[in-house]
Amino acid sequence: MAFDPEAATADYIDSLGAEALARAAEYTAGNHWLLLWNLVVSGLITWLIIRWGGLDRLNARLGRRGPNLRVFVVGLVFFLVSSLLRLPWTLYEDWWRELGYERSSQPLADFLGQGAIGIGVFAFLAALFFVGLYALIRRAGSRWWIWSGGLTAAALSAFLLAAPVVIEPLFNDFKPLPDGEVRQALVEMADEARVPAERIFVYDGSRQSNNFTANVSGVGGSARIAISDIALKGASLDEVKAVTGHEIGHYVLGHVWRMVTMLSVLAILAFFLIDRLFPRFARAFGSHATLADPAGLPVLIFMLALFSLVSEPVTNAFTRIGEIESDQYSLETVNLPDALASALVKTAEYRNPRPTRLQEMLFYTHPSVERRVRRAMDWKGQHPPD
C-alpha cells in the first residue's frame, strides 16, 4: 500500500486524544485573548502612574542634573513601579494559569524570586535603552525616529551577545550534555554544521515549564543551542536529533540576524508613528508631558505596546518562515521525518495543532503542528527510507 502523508498526519495529531486536543485548543485560545487583556492592563497601569504624578515630581527634582541621568532614574522608577502594579496580573497569567493547565509546576516562592530578578534586569536594561532614545530625540531633531532603527539594532545585538553568558544563567543552570549516545550523536551533528560542540547544552527548563522545548540563543562566540531537560527525559534519541537539527538550522541559516533586521525596521515605523501621535495619546491619558520629556515615558511605552499588538501578524509571519526553513534543514540533514513529527506532536499539548488559517496568520509564531507534521510526512513520502 502506498504511503499516504495526509492519513499519517491525521494519525499523529489524533494520537493525542480528543480530550488533550480540546484542552490544547482551549489553552491556546486563552493565550490569544490574553494579548488583548495585556493591552488593557497596560493602559490601566499607564493611567494610574500618570494620575499618581510621582514621575513628574521626580523629573522636576532631577531637572538640574544631566539629562541622561534624569532619563535613567525616571525610567528605572517607572519600570519598577509598573512591574509591581502588574504583579497581580502576572501572577494570574504566568503562574496560576500555567499551573491550572499543567504547563508548569514551579513553586510560588521560586516564581516570585525569579520574577524579582527578571524585573530588576529588565528595568535596568530598558532604562539604559531609553537613555539612548531620549538622547536621539534631543539631538537628532525631527528625524530622530530614523536613527531609532540603528539604536534598536545595536541594543538587540548587545543583548543577544550577553544574554547566554550573563542573563540566562540567572534563571537556569546550563550544563554540557553528559557523555553517552545522545551527546555523541549531537556532537557529530554539530561538527557537520560547524557549530562548536561545546556550545550545545542541557538546562533545567523543568524549573519553570513542563513544555517540550529547545532553543538557540546568542551570537558569535556566545551562540549556543540549549535543550530543556524535559525534552531529553521525554524524547527518544531520534526525536532529540531531529529537534536539535531544527535548532542547528536556526544557527546555520542566521535567523537571529534576520530577526534583528526586521525588528529594527519595525522600530523605525513605531517611533515614526509615536513622533506624530504622541500628543494625542498624552492628552487621552491626562498627561501634560511632551515627547522629549522623560515624564511622558508611560505614554510612550503604552504606544509601543499598542504597536506591538497591531504588528504581531507581521512579526509572526516572519518568524514562521524561519521555523519552516529550520524544519526543512532538519529533514534534509538529519532525515528523521517520523522523529520530527512525533517531537512536534509533544508541543501540541500547549499549542492547538489544528487552528484555522486566520488564527495561524494572526497569532501563531510557529506554523501549526498539523502543517509541520504534514510537511514531514510529505518529505517521508518523497524520500522513502532505504
Image (cartoon, helix red, strand yellow):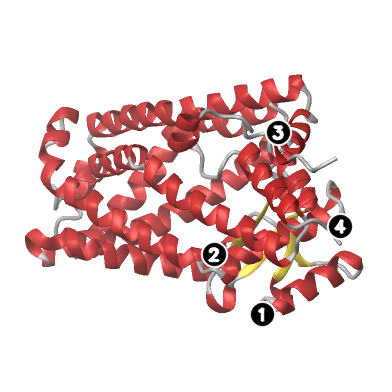
Secondary structure of residue under mark 1: loop
Q: Measured along the vertical axis of the image, is residue 87 above or below residue 140?
A: above
Please tell me which residue lies in front, 253 or 43.
253
Disc 4 marks which residue?
237
Question: 293 above or below 194?
Answer: above
Earlier in the chain: of badge 4 and badge 1, it is 1
Mark 3: few/some/many CA within 10 Å (<14, 14-19, 20+): many
Q: Amino acid at mark 3?
A: Glu
Count numbered badges in the picture: 4
Kind of element beneath mark 4: helix
Q: Which residue is labeled 1 in the image? A: 194
Q: Position of residue 300 (x, y in %)?
A: 24, 44
Residue 313, quarter of picture: top left
Circle 4/circle 2 CB separation < 8 Å: no
Q: Which residue is mark 2?
A: 163
Residue 218's disc is: none
Tell me the quadrant of the picture where the N terminus can be found: top right
Pointer 3 residue:
349
